[in-house]
Image (cartoon, grey):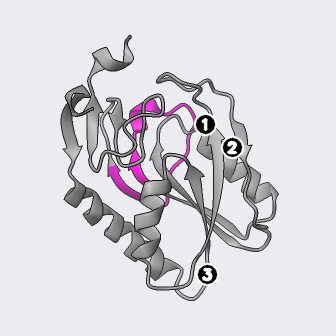
Amino acid sequence: MQEDILKVLFTEEDIQVLVRKLAKQVERDYKGRNPLMICILKGAVVFMTDFVRNIDDYVEMDFMDVSSYYGGTKSTGEVRIIKDVDTSVRDRDVILVEDIIDTGITLKSLMELFSHRGAKSVKVCSLFNKPSGRQEFVTADYVGATVPDEFIVGYGLDYDGRYRNLPYIGVLKPEVYAK
């Protein structure tokens, strides 16, 4: 697995610094408001776990599995809900927790969906932002770091279901996904 990585962009320690920074920002902004954190599966589950453990206040969690990628490295442009949230968002402060914002297609769709469902507010917390891939204009309210236009994996991010378990963020060698 390690041999498929071209270079490491963020070490395990680098990531934890970003996670703590984001958690403290959200904690400050939502003190006493019990926001509903919606983890966008599968990629954000590793981030979400560390993120909420660094918030010293009440939060509620739910999970949603959504995809616009069906294998490969490019978005299909069609958003598909695989697993919806179990919690009502009506009159709730919702924070969508993402691993990375790339095309913005999925995120735009989810923001519209939860607004339509009556959320009091819908904010986005993403560990990484890749503006070079943007097809829809969306911005995150909380971003850990901006990443270059390279295919990154690890810490929840995958290629074809693999590499999520890497403790760091690395650039995948092009020959791995060009097969």
Q: Is residue 142 visible?
A: no
Q: Is residue 19 left or right of residue 72?
A: left
> Dot 3: what SS?
loop
Which residue occupies 35% across, 38% down? 153
On the rendered structure, is 9 left or right of 42? left
Determine the secondary structure under disc 2. helix
Q: CA distance from mark 3 to mark 1?
A: 28 Å
Disc 1: which residue: 105
Q: Nearer the viewer, residue 41 or 134?
A: 41
Q: Position of residue 70 (x, y in %)?
A: 59, 26
Tell me, yes or no, whether the highlighted magenta stretch contains residue 61. Answer: no
Say whether residue 166 is visible: yes
Q: Residue at x 26, y 23 (%)?
A: 173
What mark, if any, has residue 34 been given in the picture? Answer: 3
Callout 3 touching callout 1 (CB < 8 Å): no
In the shown orientation, is residue 67 left or right of residue 153?
right
The C terminus appears in which quarter of the rendering? top left
Q: Position of residue 57 (x, y in %)?
A: 50, 85
- Is 133 one of the magenta-colored residues? yes
Residue kind at label 2, given as amino acid type: Ser
Residue at the disc numbered 2: 109
Q: Is residue 97 above or below residue 37?
A: above
Image quadrant in which you'd find residue 76: top right
Residue, far bottom: 32
How many dots with numbers?
3
State the CA–CA distance, disc 1 to disc 2: 6 Å
Q: Which residues are magenta?
A: 126-145
